[in-house]
């Protein structure tokens, strides 16, 4: 099993909840064109400080 971190580029499309530390909606498109949505804590997908007043979309990453 590889220990190398994999990275998926996502678009952060909106701020969804200000519960600490803040949650955002992220989307990515798979190889056959389907759009998938993730809800994640914003510090997990970007180093930018985000809130409801930030401009969207923004680029982010999901690591696994």
Image: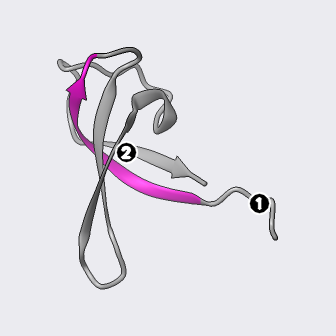
Secondary structure found at label 1: loop
What residue did someone put label 1 on? 4
Please give the name of the residue rendered at 42% of the width and 44% of the height, measured from the top-left corner: 60
Name the residue at 38% across, 53% down.
10
Residue occupied by mark 2: 59
Q: In the rendered structure, which segment of residues is drawn in magenta?
A: 7-18
Distance between the alpha carbons at the discs numbered 1 and 2: 22 Å
Q: Tag on residue 46?
A: none
Quadrant, the N terminus: bottom right
Pick the front one: 61 or 25 = 25
SS under mark 2: strand
Is 40 placed left or right of 7 in the picture?
left
- Magenta segment, principal secondary structure? strand
- Above or below 50: residue 44: below
Left or right relative to 59: residue 13: left
Residue occupying image coordinates x 24% and y 75% = 34
- Of the residues tagged 1 and 2, which is closer to the observer? 1
Q: Quadrant of the C terminus?
A: bottom right
Q: Is residue 14 magenta?
A: yes
Q: Which quadrant would residue 35 be assigned to in this image?
A: bottom left
Quarter of image, res 56: top left
Q: Position of residue 44 (x, y in %)?
A: 50, 35
The number of discs equals 2
- Compare marks 1 and 2 and give the one earlier in the sequence: 1
- The percent position of residue 27, horizontal first and vertical second, equals 29, 55
Crowd around label 2: few <14 · some 14–19 · many ≥20 (10 Å):
some
Along the horizontal axis of the image, is 14 left or right of 64? Answer: left
């Amino acid at each position: 099993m590889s220990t190398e971190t994999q990275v998926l580029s996502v678009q952060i499309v909106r701020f969804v909840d200000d519960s600490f530390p803040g949650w955002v909606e992220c989307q990515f498109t798979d190889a056959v064109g389907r759009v998938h949505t993730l809800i994640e804590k914003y510090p997990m997908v970007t180093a930018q400080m985000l809130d409801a007043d930030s401009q969207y979309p923004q680029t982010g990453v999901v690591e696994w």
